[in-house]
Each structure stands twice: as C-alpha cells, then as structure tokens.
Amino acid sequence: DAGVIQSPRHEVTEMGQEVTLRCKPISGHNSLFWYRQTMMRGLELLIYFNNNVPIDDSGMPEDRFSAKMPNASFSTLKIQPSEPRDSAVYFCASSGSGGVSGELFFGEGSRLTVL
Amino acid sequence: GESVGLHLPTLSVQEGDNSIINCAYSNSASDYFIWYKQESGKGPQFIIDIRSNMDKRQGQRVTVLLNKTVKHLSLQIAATQPGDSAVYFCAENRGTGANSKLTFGKGITLSVRP
C-alpha cells in the first residue's frame, strides 16, 4: 500500500519566491495534518483538516502561509512570499480515526531551504 | 505553560542492553500518549500508544509506562539493536474527535553502540 506521498522532497528557493508543497494522504484517511520540523522548535502542528475541512489552523505562523484541501486525496501548503526563517522540513500526515486519537502516518517530508 | 518535553537530548546504549527513554508532560487533561520513532531522512513512525486509563502497555520489544501522578511517560526498548538508532518523540493528545490535538516533544536521539 502506498503511504503518504509528499512532493517535492527537496526544494531550494530564494527569499520572496512562492513555495508550494503537495501531499497525497493514504486513501480512505479522513484527517490530514501539516507539520513543520526544525531543530529549535521540533515538530509543530501547522494545520489539520478533517473531511477536507480545516479544523485548526492556529499553528500557521502568519498570513504568508496558506493550506488547502480541495478533495480527499490532495492537499497543498503554500508559502508566499518565502523567507529564510521558513527553512525547515515540512511533513504531511494522515489518519483514519477522525481525529488525532490514533496513529498518524507521516510522509517522508519536504525539505525546504530559503536562501 | 503547557508543554511536552524530554529530559535528555541524547542517549547512548550498548547493543543488547535495554533502553529507557523518558518524557515529562505538564497537561493533566491529556488523555492519550504516543511514542514515535524518526530515522534519518524519514518521517516519524508510530511505535506504541497508551491511553490515560492505563499505566502500562507492551508491544514487541517495547513497553510504554505512564505515571499520571507525576506526569511522566517512558519508553522501554528491550535488547536494543542497531536498527533502533533514531530520534524518539513522545506526543500527547488533548481533546476528542475532530477537536483533538497532538503535541510533540522535542525528541531524543538514541545511539546504539555495537
């Protein structure tokens, strides 16, 4: 079975450019999560969706960040404009338990470097 | 403030020995706890979970202990193997259903000496 699929795996961009990260959750899972991982702050929940609806976006750093889930099999996390402090590994995870009281399945992450 | 944190940033153990990784949490309302393992270049992977109505749960070579009195969680790995080398995260969940939220600790690196 395919796990959570993220793209791109690596992205290097210049400050001010738009970045779009993509995620395909595990088929049948109804919850999707975007996390950011840095050495300083660890794993931070940015936003999560349940049945394609954003439930909690309180972790989104600022208006430069936006996330969408147009259907059950696809989500994007967009940063516009990007800044060097956005450099991190961004993980997408999905769950089939209708919330986080259950196992999260993580993708392999998208490593973003903003110069 | 509310937080989930780990006592030690790194742990080095001899292959074959048992490992104990500790975690402290501060929110007594948390009702569900999970341990994740993250290998280099990969996403976190579920190891074992425990609900707040339990104090111990065993898996294959792993045991999670929960002490709600002192808000302490530990992961025990029996007969540690080189493949156990990774960063380990504890996570706590608060809330229920769609309103629940998982918060991760900073992580601890387990290094297994051959």
Image (cartoon, grey):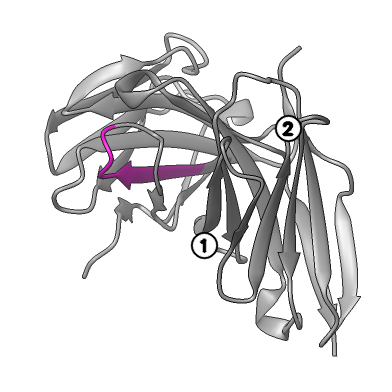
Mark 1 Cα-neighbour bin, 10 Å: few <14, some 14–19, many ≥20: some
**Can residue A87 be seen in this snapshot?**
no
Mark 2 Cα-neighbour bin, 10 Å: few <14, some 14–19, many ≥20: some
Q: Quadrant of the C terminus of chain B?
A: bottom right
Q: Which residue is mark 1?
A: B42
Q: Identify which residue, A74 or A53, lies in the foreground.
A: A53
Q: Identify which residue, B102 or A61, lies in the foreground.
A: B102
Query: Relative to B42, is A54 above or below?
Result: above
Instruction: Give coordinates of residue A70: x percent, y percent.
Output: 12, 28
Amino acid type of the residue that numbered disc 2 sits on in the rendered structure: Lys
- Subunit of label 1: B
Q: Is residue A76 left or right of residue B83?
A: left
Residue at 42% over, 28% down? A17
Local secondary structure at mark 2: loop
- Subunit of label 2: B
Instruction: Give coordinates of residue B79: x percent, y percent.
Output: 76, 83
Instruction: Give coordinates of residue A84: x percent, y percent.
Output: 61, 30
- In magenta segment, residue B41: no
Nearer the observer: mark 1 or 2; the answer is 2
Q: Which residue is mark 2?
A: B68
Which residue is the extreme one toward the left? A71
Residue at 71% over, 17% down? B2
Q: Is residue A82 left or right of residue B12?
A: left
Q: Main secondary structure of the magenta part?
A: strand
Q: Quadrant of the N terminus of chain B?
A: top right
- In magenta segment, residue A91: yes
Q: Is residue B83 left or right of residue A60?
A: right
Magenta-drawn segment: A90-98
Amino acid type of the residue that numbered disc 1 sits on in the rendered structure: Lys
Which image quadrant is residue B57 in? bottom right
Instruction: Give coordinates of residue A3: x percent, y percent.
Output: 29, 62
Residue at 60% over, 66% down? B39
